[in-house]
Image (cartoon, helix red, strand yellow):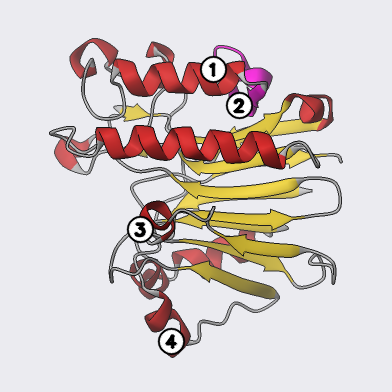
Amino acid sequence: MKLISWNINGLRAILLKGDLVNFLKTESPDILCLQEIKISEAKIKAADFKFPGYYFLANGAKREGYSGTAMLIKEDFLGADDIIKNGIGIDEFDDEGRIQILELPKFYLVNVYFPNANHELSRLDYKLRFNAALLKYLKKLEEKKPIVITGDFNVAHQAIDLARPKENEGNAGFTIEECDWMTKFLAAKFIDSFRFLNDALVQYSWWSYRAGARARNVGWRIDYFCVSDKIKKYLKKAYILDKVLGSDHAPVGLEINL
């Protein structure tokens, strides 16, 4: 099974460039999870997006041009008993279209666009509330079957996960609070698949648009596939497609034999 996650930084923008359709043809994932689609539910229905060979299941934010998630699932992969749910039943988070949950026969696939704490840390409290509510929900979900959770976590967990840790201490995505939560999340028996399979490999999934950061590889690893501990023995490959353009984020992938 081949799963890929990509913060595309705007669905309409990446479609205009042709990068998303070309990516589907080249990589052919069984499921592609998208974050930051930046289009409301009403505009999604009006546009009637088509992706040959894939079902397009979106969770748009109430606010136009903001946040949102989507899944592209191969038509021959989605079974009649597979169930997708948007949100976790808490309006302040669900209104921003941040969470999708796909129930597959052997595990849940959870697609998440975590809040950005913002440069002034104006949304740090919101993000920490979101994180706490999501973890509580996941652990309840895990009582039924294991979980694969993916998306833009908007946090670089450790110094190895960003090019300039000293300069970014206390900045959004590398605050003590955010990093401590990620440690707590992993301690709750979730495995960071990239770090588990690649040990000390230094590779990034996001670069600022400023000062040619991507060309100089001054980046952050903030996009993840994490899995329940029960699934780790089935992990085959975890990777970052950092040569793929079209967004300020690179797609991240997971191949799993389950």
Q: Secondary structure at mark 4?
A: helix
Stretch in magenta: 190-200
Please tell me how crowded label 2 is: few (under 14), some (14-19), or many (20+) other residues with Cα within 10 Å. Answer: many
Residue annotated with mark 4: 47
Residue annotated with mark 2: 194
Q: CA distance from mark 2 to mark 3?
A: 25 Å
Residue 70's mark?
none
| Quadrant into which the C terminus falls | top right
Residue 67's mark?
3
Task: Choose mark 4 or mark 3, whichever is in front.
Answer: 3
Q: Is there CB contact under 8 Å for labels 3 and 1? A: no
Q: CA distance from mark 1 to mark 2?
A: 9 Å
Q: Secondary structure at mark 3?
A: loop
Residue 198 belongs to magenta span: yes
Question: Considering only vertical position in the picture, is 203 above or below 51?
Answer: above
Q: Residue at x 41, y 43 (%)?
A: 114
Q: Is residue 197 left or right of residue 157?
A: right
Q: Is there CB contact under 8 Å for labels 2 and 3? A: no
Q: Amino acid at mark 3?
A: Ser
Q: CA distance from mark 2 to mark 4?
A: 35 Å
Q: Is there CB contact under 8 Å for labels 1 and 2? A: yes
Q: Is residue 147 left or right of residue 212?
A: right
Residue annotated with mark 1: 201
Mark 1 or mark 3, which is nearer the start of the sequence? 3
Q: Secondary structure at mark 1?
A: loop
